[in-house]
Amino acid sequence: MSTLQRPAVEPCRPEEATPVRVDGDALDSTAPDYLRDLKADLAGERLVPARLTVDACFKEDCSLSTQQEAERIRDHIRAAAFLGAGTLTVSFDSVGDERKVRPALAACAERARRDGVTLELDGPLALEP
């Protein structure tokens, strides 16, 4: 007895949709209701969110500020996953205390991985592979 396995992705007619980058800082909310409406509006215009971008600030040498910013990034990770965007790019210029920021970003990267989103950093820190 043989069992046929179907691939997860099967060939079909090409879809005519344009991948777009969504500015996370311009979102009114990361709540599911808002994101559902945004996704529907984009689909109605034949647009597909491919990447979500967000600016972050890690200039302060403060654990509380770092954790608040990390929580904001996690909100955007959830938004990217909800919208179907494969990548979240986090941009930042400087880091107040690398010893506080690096573990916070590593935790965000792990969260992104679990949610099926690639976290890219555009700043002075890189995550360990």
Image (spheres, rainbow, N blue to C red):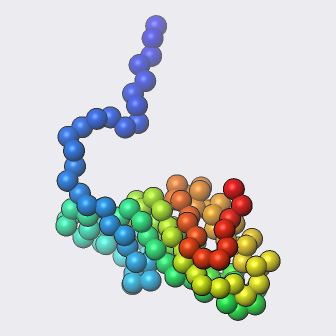
Residue 115 to residue 73: above or below: above
Q: Quadrant of residue 31?
A: bottom left
Q: Is residue 24 left or right of residue 40?
A: right
Q: Residue at x 72, y 78 (%)?
A: 101
Specify the quadrant that holds the C terminus: bottom right
Q: Quadrant of residue 110?
A: bottom right
Q: Nearer the viewer, residue 98 or 22?
A: 98
Instruction: For residue 18, say whether it is visible.
Output: yes
Q: Residue at x 45, y 16 (%)?
A: 3
Residue that lies at the very extreme toward the front in this rendered image: 124
Residue that lies at the very extreme toward the right in this rendered image: 99
Q: Position of residue 126 (x, y in %)?
A: 66, 68
Q: Is residue 77 left or right of residue 49?
A: right
Q: Quadrant of residue 57?
A: bottom right
Q: Residue at x 42, y 62 (%)?
A: 85
Q: Is residue 62 left or right of residue 23?
A: right
Q: Position of residue 47 (x, y in %)?
A: 26, 64
Q: Position of residue 34 (x, y in %)?
A: 36, 76
Q: Nearer the viewer, residue 36 or 11?
A: 11
The tally of labels here is 0
Q: Position of residue 99 (x, y in %)?
A: 80, 77
Instruction: For residue 29, say whether it is visible.
Output: no
Residue 59 to residue 125: above or below: below
Q: Nearer the viewer, residue 20 or 7?
A: 20
Residue that lies at the very extreme toward the top in this rendered image: 1
Q: Residue at x 32, y 67 (%)?
A: 20
